[in-house]
């Protein structure tokens, strides 16, 4: 099963073209599509009842034809360091996680902080990275484009209406749900919808080479982050099964192709795990890769995940690793811990909640 067919499609999957086609089948003028989308994205109407410039019959049809609330915010957890995790329940009862990260900017107040929303693209994940909670219960299904956009609309409501960046780095391998991902990102980018510039959208992948190459050909021009987590095949093989299909000798040329097509700096994500990938040899190998790709390295100390054996390296060891990269002129940051107290490693909140909740559809 690759999808789920709800009784009514989420309205957030519609575009001016698809909506105008449906309206024309009804005999309604095409300009109504623009009015409807304006209500949804600019005026943030939660239901057709609010769309006061539409005829009553059209409002009624909209309510019958589309789901205006496909994702229900079920649970929110706010961490002490301004990370907020929202568990969203989909129409079939599946749970997905969305994270809102509030990063204050230097010299200005919290009200000017940058809000980044991290969205999920699948329920569960088939990729089975050994350090990840999302892969523990396996893959259940892909999210539709409308469900992905709806996650952002829910997050925007929770986050006070605006956000500055979207990272597709939540539950699931985004490039394994390529068509729905692209359809959703085009809506996020479109001026008639959320209007978020492509430079503010980052897609993160564990290294699905053919889809990295496909994304490189997309005119949309989003940013790419690659979850490397090991600077040699030996280490990647231990913790990322995807490396058997797409080892470094395939992955790195694909990254180089992406970077040259879009002229944008890639990010290499690297979860630091004690005794697995935190040696200075790994740091040196990682520096070689980053320099060849002109990539930025984002070091993320691993979170303890219930049921998994991995430990976070000591702060001293994390800093040695960072220094080894910088000594080789690599642009690198060591991520300050965000959200450890809210099960922020991807998939943890969902797993914990699923143990407690019956898997019911929302009303
Ligand atoms: S890290 Fe990403 S690709 Fe790997 S199992 Fe977790 S969600 Fe899937």
Image: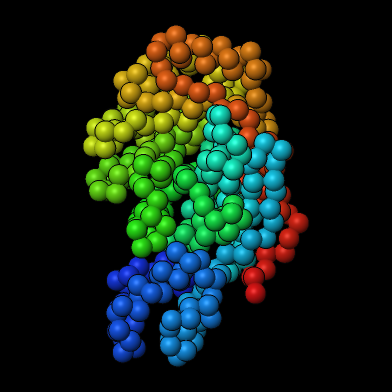
Please tell me which residue lies in front, 268 or 26. 26
Identify the image quadrant of the C terminus: bottom right
Question: Image quarter for residue 156?
Answer: bottom right
Q: Position of residue 347 (x, y in %)?
A: 61, 46
Residue at coordinates 56% horizontally, 34% vertically from top-left? 108
Residue lying farthest to the right in this orientation: 356
Render colour scheme:
rainbow
Q: Position of residue 89 (x, y in %)?
A: 62, 62
Image vertical order of residue 229 relative to residue 283, above or below: below
The extreme top residue here reads: 327
For the question of whether residue 117 can be seen, the reply is: yes
Residue at far front of view:
108
Q: Residue at x 39, y 61 (%)?
A: 193
Q: Can residue 257 be spotted in the picture?
A: no
Q: Nearer the viewer, residue 224 or 304?
A: 224
Q: Position of residue 115 (x, y in %)?
A: 54, 44
In the rendered view, does 233 fall on the left or right side of 77?
Answer: left
294 and 198: which is toward the camera: 198
Against 161, residue 35 (above or below) is: below
Looking at the image, residue 73 lies above or below residue 322: below
Q: Position of residue 258 (x, y in %)?
A: 28, 36
Q: Is residue 310 above or below residue 87?
A: above
């Amino acid at each position: 099963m690759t999808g789920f067919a709800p009784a009514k499609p989420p309205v957030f999957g519609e575009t001016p073209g698809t909506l105008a086609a449906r309206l024309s089948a009804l005999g309604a003028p095409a300009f109504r599509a623009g009015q409807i989308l304006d209500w949804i994205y600019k005026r943030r109407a939660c239901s057709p009842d609010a769309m006061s410039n539409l005829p009553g019959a059209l409002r009624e049809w909209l309510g019958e034809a589309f789901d205006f609330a496909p994702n229900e915010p079920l649970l929110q957890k706010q961490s002490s360091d301004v990370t907020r995790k929202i568990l969203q329940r989909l129409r079939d009862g599946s749970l997905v996680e969305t994270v809102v990260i509030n990063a204050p900017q230097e010299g200005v107040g919290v009200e000017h902080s940058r809000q980044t929303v991290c969205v999920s693209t699948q329920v569960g994940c088939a990729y089975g990275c050994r350090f990840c909670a999302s892969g523990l219960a396996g893959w259940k299904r892909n999210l539709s484009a409308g469900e992905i956009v709806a996650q952002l609309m829910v997050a925007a409501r929770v986050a006070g209406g605006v956000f500055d960046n979207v990272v597709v780095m939540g539950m699931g391998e985004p490039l394994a749900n390529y068509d729905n991902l692209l359809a959703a990102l085009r809506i996020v980018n479109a001026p008639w919808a959320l209007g978020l510039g492509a430079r503010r959208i980052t897609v993160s992948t564990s290294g699905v080479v053919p889809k990295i190459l496909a994304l490189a050909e997309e005119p949309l021009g989003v940013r790419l982050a690659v979850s490397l987590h090991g600077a040699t095949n030996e280490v990647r093989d231990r913790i990322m099964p995807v490396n058997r299909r797409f080892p470094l000798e395939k992955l790195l040329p694909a990254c180089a192709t992406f970077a040259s097509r879009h002229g944008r700096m890639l990010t290499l994500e690297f979860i630091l795990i004690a005794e697995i990938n935190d040696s200075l040899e790994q740091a040196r190998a990682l520096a070689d890769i980053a320099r060849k790709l002109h990539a930025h390295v984002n070091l993320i100390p691993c979170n303890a995940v219930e049921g998994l054996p991995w430990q976070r390296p000591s702060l001293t060891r994390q800093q040695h690793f960072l220094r080894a990269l910088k000594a080789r002129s690599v642009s690198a940051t060591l991520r300050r811990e965000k959200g450890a107290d809210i099960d922020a490693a991807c998939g943890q909140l969902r797993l914990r909640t699923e143990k407690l909740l019956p898997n019911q559809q929302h009303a």
